[in-house]
Image (spheres, helix red, strand yellow):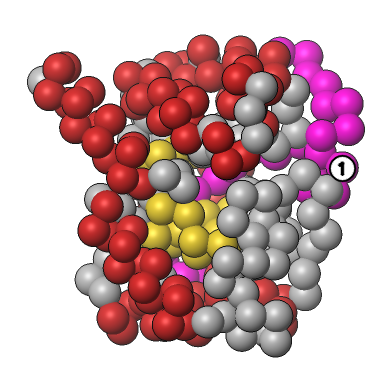
């Protein structure tokens, strides 16, 4: 899953495709998607709201203005599934109508109306664990048992989805590395990935360029590629099916090596 942020303030690539006048630069976006596909991406994840620590929410209108033209342009130009990284009911509905193939929600469909909109879309949904909101999620997060707490939360969201008519076969789980978690929380959660995989749902992991990589290596965002790819490979070895990444070519190469060795 290749990350395509149409935002002015995402932690790694914010502003790259956002013109500042409420409209994305579609020619640059399509050039980037073309490169992503040539590097080995199988899914494009489009986001119009930054979820970095401390990020402020955007209005549904602003998010739609950023995301919808991009989804429409990608779907019309390329034969690739498009995921939309959103928690907003109107964006969920409009993205589905524009041809999106999946909803990826860091809030696990907890915003009012999101669950209903996702059910009506008929699309697969990725449910992520996050403690708090991006504005304050990294301010002293605490758990009784991080692995058990995350698993319990995600199973509760699965139950909510099923009650709304979203079948289990449409559900993907994401433990939410870096979202309301310290380095130690992230490491414990990573080691427990086989338990989450054991629940029977496909698991997505997003560790690319995140602070846990930077903290371990003492490196800034632009120097975290090697650490991100290494952690991604360990996630795959623990049963993860989808990697959300920035460094597509390096990740694809590493996966080929891993698959060749492990068969």
SS of the residue under disc 1 = loop
**Above or below, comparing residue 104 to residue 260 in the picture:** below
Residue 72 on the magenta span: no
Q: Is 3 left, or right, of 212 in this rendering?
A: left
Task: Give the residue at x 67% y 56%.
Answer: 10
Front-lying residue, 53 or 239: 53
In the picture of the structure, the residue carrying the numbered disc 1 is 136
Q: Is any part of residue 32 visible from this angle?
A: yes
Residue 123 on the magenta span: yes
Q: Is any part of residue 168 visible from this angle?
A: no
**Above or below, comparing residue 147 to residue 211 in the picture:** above
Q: How many marks?
A: 1
Q: Is 60 left, or right, of 222 in this rendering?
A: right
Front-lying residue, 202 or 257: 257
Q: Measured from the top left, where is residue 57 in percent x and y?
A: 79, 63
Task: Give the residue at x 23% y 58%.
Answer: 38
Q: Measured from the top left, where is residue 239 in percent x and y?
A: 34, 24
- Specify the quadrant of the image occupied by residue 156: top right
Task: Give the residue at x 74% y 23%.
Answer: 182
Q: Measured from the top left, where is residue 30 in percent x and y?
A: 38, 75
- Specify the quadrant of the image occupied by residue 200: top left
**Above or below, comparing residue 159 to residue 43 in the picture:** above
Front-lying residue, 149 or 131: 131
Circle 1: is it few (<14), some (14-19), or many (20+) Cα within 10 Å? some
**Residues in magenta, as a range:** 119-147
Task: Give the residue at x 58% y 66%.
Answer: 16
Most frequent secondary structure within the magenta stretch: loop
Q: Quadrant of the C terminus?
A: top left
């Amino acid at each position: 899953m290749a990350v395509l942020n149409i935002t002015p303030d995402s932690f790694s690539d914010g502003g790259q495709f956002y013109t500042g006048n409420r409209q994305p630069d579609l020619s640059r976006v399509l050039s980037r998607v073309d490169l992503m596909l040539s590097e080995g991406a199988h899914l494009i994840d489009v986001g119009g709201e930054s979820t970095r620590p401390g990020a402020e929410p955007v209005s549904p209108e602003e998010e739609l203005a950023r995301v919808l033209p991009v989804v429409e342009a990608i779907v019309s130009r390329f034969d690739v599934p498009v995921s939309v990284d959103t928690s907003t009911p109107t964006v969920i509905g409009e993205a589905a109508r524009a041809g999106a193939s999946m909803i990826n929600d860091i809030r696990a469909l907890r915003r009012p109306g999101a669950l209903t909109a996702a059910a009506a879309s008929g699309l697969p949904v990725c449910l992520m664990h996050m403690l708090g909101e991006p504005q304050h999620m990294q301010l002293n997060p605490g758990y009784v048992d991080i692995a058990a707490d995350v698993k319990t939360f995600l199973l509760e969201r699965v139950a909510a989805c099923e009650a709304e008519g979203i079948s289990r076969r449409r559900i993907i789980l994401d433990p939410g590395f870096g979202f309301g978690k310290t380095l130690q929380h992230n490491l414990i959660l990573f080691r427990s990935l086989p338990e989450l995989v054991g629940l029977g749902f496909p698991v997505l992991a997003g560790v690319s360029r995140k602070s846990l990589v930077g903290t371990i290596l003492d490196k800034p965002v632009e120097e975290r590629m090697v650490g991100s790819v290494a952690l991604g490979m360990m996630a795959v070895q623990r049963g993860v099916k989808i990697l959300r990444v920035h460094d597509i070519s390096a990740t694809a190469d590493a996966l080929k090596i891993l698959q060749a060795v492990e068969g």
